[in-house]
Amino acid sequence: MQQSRTGSVARKTAETDIAVSVNLDGTGAYDVSTGIGFLDHMVEQFSRHSLIDVTMRVAGDLHVDQHHTTEDSAIALGQAITQALGDKKGIARYGTAYSPMDEALCRVALDISGRPVLVWKAAFTQPRLGEMDTELFEHWFQSVSQAAGITLHIESLYGSNNHHIIEGIYKGFARAMRQAVEIDPRKGDAVPSTKGILGG
């Protein structure tokens, strides 16, 4: 019988106090509060479309700026995902998604390789969405990639509406993660690597 694939991380610094938990075999249930409304919306989209349950509570130094809250919440999410994946036996490992959002189209390809790399090809024409600085989106994905050991390629192929572009990216990331963390019954309990381990 498959063990529960869950992870919980509590992370407290002088800048943020964060608690995150995930269930890779969930239904897309979420309870998210970061203090940044637009970031809440994006993490909720990730949960709903990946079917990974996410609980995220963040108290950050938003009186300074949004940087620490954005970065640290992503690190904690990545760490919780890593914990939930355990030894990664039996996972599909790879995921790819094209994500249309009205006039925008985004592509996300990833490998839960243990080798964190972010290739980011997306740009925004306005400095903020809601109250969130658009320059922080790349940093969020960089932090998740590093903490979860994901090789992550993200590209906005086209689109004119900034909200549609970033929402398409988060939904594409979610769909690709859903594929990658799924247990492939043909793999049994094998680690999906000829090395026998993932990473390095």
Image (cartoon, rainbow, N blue to C red):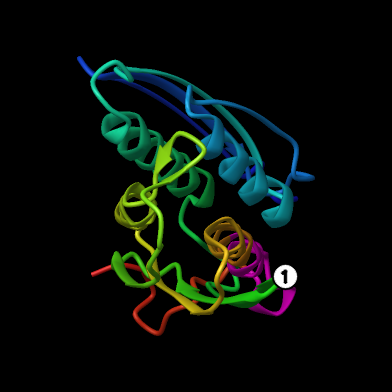
Up-down relation of residue 82 to residue 199 (above or below): above
**Is 139 covered by the magenta stretch?**
no
Residue 158, position as x, y percentages in the image: 53, 81
**Percent position of residue 86, x then y:** 48, 50
Position above or below: 55 against 134: above
User: Residue shown at 36%/37% (left/top)?
Assistant: 70
In the image, residue 180 lies in the stretch drawn in magenta:
yes
Q: Is residue 200 left or right of residue 6?
A: left
What segment is highlighted magenta in the picture?
A: 174-188
Residue 16, compared with residue 52, is above or below; it is: above
Image-based side of 75 in relation to 107, left or right: left
Q: Which residue lies at the image location 31% right of the left edge and 20% below the top edge?
A: 16
Residue at the limit of the structure toward the left, as seen here: 14
* Residue 53 in picture, x, y percent from top left: 68, 40
| Number of other residues with Cα within 10 Å of mark 1, as a class: few under 14, some 14 to 19, many 20 or more | few
Q: Foreground residue, 29 or 90?
A: 29
Comparing 115 with 142, the one in front is 142
Q: Dividing the picture into quarters, in which one does residue 133 lie?
A: top left
Against 86, is 90 above or below?
below
- Looking at the picture, how far across and down is residue 162, in whole percent? 52, 60
For this orientation, the residue located farthest to the right is 27
What kind of residue is marked 1? Asp
In the image, 142 versus 103, the foreground residue is: 103
Q: Residue sitting at 31 percent across and 68 percent down? A: 118
Q: Which residue is mark 1?
A: 102
Which quarter of the image is occupied by the C terminus? bottom left
Q: Main secondary structure of the magenta part?
A: helix
